[in-house]
Image (cartoon, rainbow, N blue to C red):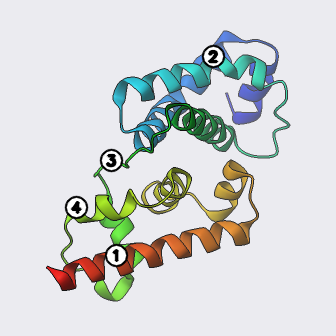
Protein backbone atom coordinates (compact mmCIF):
# COMPACT_ATOMS: atom_id res chain seq x y z
CA UNK A 1 0.00 0.00 0.00
CA UNK A 2 1.43 3.40 -0.95
CA UNK A 3 1.55 6.36 1.43
CA UNK A 4 -1.66 7.92 0.10
CA UNK A 5 -3.40 4.56 0.55
CA UNK A 6 -2.10 4.29 4.12
CA UNK A 7 -3.28 7.83 4.87
CA UNK A 8 -6.74 7.15 3.44
CA UNK A 9 -6.87 3.88 5.38
CA UNK A 10 -5.91 5.63 8.62
CA UNK A 11 -8.58 8.25 8.08
CA UNK A 12 -11.19 5.53 7.59
CA UNK A 13 -10.04 3.61 10.68
CA UNK A 14 -8.25 0.74 8.95
CA UNK A 15 -6.24 -1.44 11.33
CA UNK A 16 -4.20 -2.66 8.38
CA UNK A 17 -3.13 0.91 7.59
CA UNK A 18 -2.17 1.46 11.23
CA UNK A 19 -0.17 -1.80 11.18
CA UNK A 20 1.66 -0.66 8.03
CA UNK A 21 2.42 2.73 9.62
CA UNK A 22 3.71 0.95 12.72
CA UNK A 23 5.88 -1.40 10.69
CA UNK A 24 7.42 1.40 8.65
CA UNK A 25 7.86 4.08 11.31
CA UNK A 26 7.80 2.71 14.87
CA UNK A 27 11.56 2.19 14.95
CA UNK A 28 12.23 5.79 13.89
CA UNK A 29 9.72 7.15 16.40
CA UNK A 30 11.27 5.09 19.20
CA UNK A 31 14.79 6.16 18.18
CA UNK A 32 13.89 9.86 18.16
CA UNK A 33 12.08 9.60 21.50
CA UNK A 34 15.08 7.81 23.02
CA UNK A 35 17.48 10.44 21.67
CA UNK A 36 15.42 13.19 23.28
CA UNK A 37 14.57 11.48 26.58
CA UNK A 38 17.65 9.27 27.09
CA UNK A 39 15.42 6.70 28.75
CA UNK A 40 14.27 3.51 27.03
CA UNK A 41 11.11 3.07 29.10
CA UNK A 42 10.02 6.67 28.57
CA UNK A 43 10.79 6.38 24.84
CA UNK A 44 8.63 3.27 24.62
CA UNK A 45 5.84 5.15 26.43
CA UNK A 46 6.12 7.97 23.90
CA UNK A 47 6.05 5.46 21.04
CA UNK A 48 2.82 4.01 22.35
CA UNK A 49 1.34 7.45 23.07
CA UNK A 50 2.12 8.64 19.54
CA UNK A 51 0.53 5.61 17.91
CA UNK A 52 -2.50 5.81 20.21
CA UNK A 53 -2.91 9.42 19.03
CA UNK A 54 -2.69 8.52 15.35
CA UNK A 55 -6.33 7.47 14.71
CA UNK A 56 -7.74 10.75 16.06
CA UNK A 57 -4.85 13.05 15.07
CA UNK A 58 -4.83 11.80 11.47
CA UNK A 59 -8.27 13.32 10.96
CA UNK A 60 -6.65 16.78 11.19
CA UNK A 61 -3.66 15.79 9.04
CA UNK A 62 -4.00 17.37 5.59
CA UNK A 63 -1.29 15.30 3.95
CA UNK A 64 0.90 18.30 3.07
CA UNK A 65 3.96 16.46 4.39
CA UNK A 66 5.06 12.84 4.49
CA UNK A 67 3.52 10.61 7.15
CA UNK A 68 6.99 10.06 8.63
CA UNK A 69 7.51 13.80 9.00
CA UNK A 70 4.11 14.13 10.64
CA UNK A 71 4.95 11.29 13.07
CA UNK A 72 8.27 12.99 13.92
CA UNK A 73 6.28 16.14 14.75
CA UNK A 74 3.92 14.18 17.03
CA UNK A 75 6.95 12.54 18.64
CA UNK A 76 8.85 15.79 19.18
CA UNK A 77 5.75 17.39 20.72
CA UNK A 78 5.17 14.43 23.03
CA UNK A 79 8.81 14.39 24.13
CA UNK A 80 8.96 18.15 24.72
CA UNK A 81 5.78 17.97 26.79
CA UNK A 82 7.32 15.17 28.87
CA UNK A 83 10.56 17.13 29.32
CA UNK A 84 8.69 20.27 30.38
CA UNK A 85 6.49 18.33 32.78
CA UNK A 86 9.49 16.72 34.45
CA UNK A 87 11.55 19.93 34.33
CA UNK A 88 14.57 18.13 33.05
CA UNK A 89 16.49 18.14 29.82
CA UNK A 90 17.49 14.99 28.04
CA UNK A 91 20.84 13.98 26.63
CA UNK A 92 21.36 12.58 23.17
CA UNK A 93 22.58 8.99 22.89
CA UNK A 94 26.33 8.77 22.28
CA UNK A 95 25.78 6.86 19.05
CA UNK A 96 26.55 8.71 15.81
CA UNK A 97 28.40 11.53 17.62
CA UNK A 98 31.00 11.47 14.90
CA UNK A 99 28.45 12.69 12.34
CA UNK A 100 27.48 15.62 14.54
CA UNK A 101 31.12 16.46 15.27
CA UNK A 102 32.01 16.35 11.55
CA UNK A 103 29.20 18.79 10.82
CA UNK A 104 30.21 21.06 13.70
CA UNK A 105 33.95 21.00 13.00
CA UNK A 106 33.71 21.07 9.22
CA UNK A 107 35.05 18.85 6.47
CA UNK A 108 38.70 19.85 7.00
CA UNK A 109 38.77 18.52 10.53
CA UNK A 110 36.90 15.23 10.01
CA UNK A 111 39.79 13.14 11.21
CA UNK A 112 40.25 15.06 14.45
CA UNK A 113 39.83 12.93 17.53
CA UNK A 114 37.10 13.88 19.95
CA UNK A 115 36.02 12.87 23.41
CA UNK A 116 32.41 11.64 23.48
CA UNK A 117 32.05 12.65 27.13
CA UNK A 118 33.18 16.16 26.27
CA UNK A 119 30.81 16.27 23.32
CA UNK A 120 27.96 15.07 25.53
CA UNK A 121 28.76 17.83 28.00
CA UNK A 122 28.63 20.42 25.20
CA UNK A 123 25.44 19.03 23.66
CA UNK A 124 23.74 19.00 27.06
CA UNK A 125 24.20 22.76 27.23
CA UNK A 126 21.97 23.15 24.17
CA UNK A 127 18.18 23.27 24.63
CA UNK A 128 16.47 19.88 24.11
CA UNK A 129 14.68 21.11 20.99
CA UNK A 130 17.97 22.25 19.42
CA UNK A 131 19.67 18.94 20.32
CA UNK A 132 16.85 17.00 18.67
CA UNK A 133 17.00 19.27 15.62
CA UNK A 134 20.76 18.71 15.34
CA UNK A 135 20.26 14.96 15.72
CA UNK A 136 17.55 14.77 13.07
CA UNK A 137 19.60 16.81 10.59
CA UNK A 138 23.07 15.37 11.10
CA UNK A 139 22.53 11.82 12.33
CA UNK A 140 19.15 10.96 10.79
CA UNK A 141 19.77 12.91 7.56
CA UNK A 142 16.52 14.88 7.41
CA UNK A 143 16.53 17.93 5.20
CA UNK A 144 15.71 21.50 6.18
CA UNK A 145 12.22 21.29 4.67
CA UNK A 146 11.37 18.29 6.86
CA UNK A 147 12.75 19.99 9.96
CA UNK A 148 10.75 23.08 9.10
CA UNK A 149 7.57 20.99 9.02
CA UNK A 150 8.43 19.09 12.20
CA UNK A 151 9.26 22.18 14.27
CA UNK A 152 6.78 24.55 12.57
CA UNK A 153 9.54 27.06 11.89
CA UNK A 154 10.69 28.80 8.70
CA UNK A 155 13.65 27.26 6.87
CA UNK A 156 15.82 30.27 7.77
CA UNK A 157 15.14 29.80 11.49
CA UNK A 158 16.07 26.11 11.28
CA UNK A 159 19.28 26.93 9.40
CA UNK A 160 20.19 29.65 11.90
CA UNK A 161 19.60 27.38 14.91
CA UNK A 162 21.63 24.57 13.37
CA UNK A 163 24.43 26.98 12.49
CA UNK A 164 24.51 28.46 16.01
CA UNK A 165 24.43 24.99 17.57
CA UNK A 166 27.31 23.75 15.40
CA UNK A 167 29.29 26.91 16.09
CA UNK A 168 28.69 26.48 19.83
CA UNK A 169 29.80 22.81 19.73
CA UNK A 170 32.90 23.65 17.69
CA UNK A 171 33.90 26.46 20.09
CA UNK A 172 33.11 24.35 23.14
CA UNK A 173 35.22 21.39 21.92
CA UNK A 174 38.07 23.68 20.83
CA UNK A 175 38.15 25.52 24.18
CA UNK A 176 38.01 22.33 26.21
CA UNK A 177 40.69 20.59 24.15
CA UNK A 178 42.98 23.63 24.39
CA UNK A 179 42.57 23.64 28.17
CA UNK A 180 43.23 19.90 28.47
Q: Are marks 2 and 3 in contact (CB under 8 Å)?
A: no
Residue 96: quarter of image? bottom left
Q: Which residue is mark 1?
A: 172
Mark with earlier residue (1, 4): 4
Comparing marks 2 and 3, which lies closer to the viewer? 3
Q: Is residue 87 left or right of residue 92?
A: right
Q: Which residue is mark 4?
A: 116
Check disc 3 and report its element: helix, strand or loop.
Answer: loop
Tell me the CA gap for discs 1 and 4.
13 Å
Which quarter of the rendered picture does the N terminus lie within? top right
Question: From where the camera sits, is residue 110 visible?
Answer: no
Local packing at callout 2 (Cα closer than 10 Å; few below 14, some 14-19, many 20+) is: few
Q: Which residue is mark 2?
A: 52
Mark with earlier residue (3, 1): 3
Check disc 4 and report its element: helix, strand or loop.
Answer: helix
**Which residue occupies 33% across, 89% down?**
108
Q: Are marks 1 and 2 in contact (CB under 8 Å)?
A: no
Check disc 2 and report its element: helix, strand or loop.
Answer: helix
Q: Are marks 3 and 1 in contact (CB under 8 Å)?
A: no
Q: Are marks 1 and 4 in contact (CB under 8 Å)?
A: no
**Which residue occupies 46% across, 63% down?**
138
Estimate the x, y position of residue 178 in percent, counting from the top left.
Answer: 20, 85
Q: Which residue is mark 3?
A: 93
Amino acid sequence: MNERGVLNGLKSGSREALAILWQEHSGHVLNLAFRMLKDRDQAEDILMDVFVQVPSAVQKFRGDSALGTWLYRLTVNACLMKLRAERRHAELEEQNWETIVKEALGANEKEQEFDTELLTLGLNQLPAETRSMLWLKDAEGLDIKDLSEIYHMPDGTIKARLSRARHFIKDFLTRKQENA
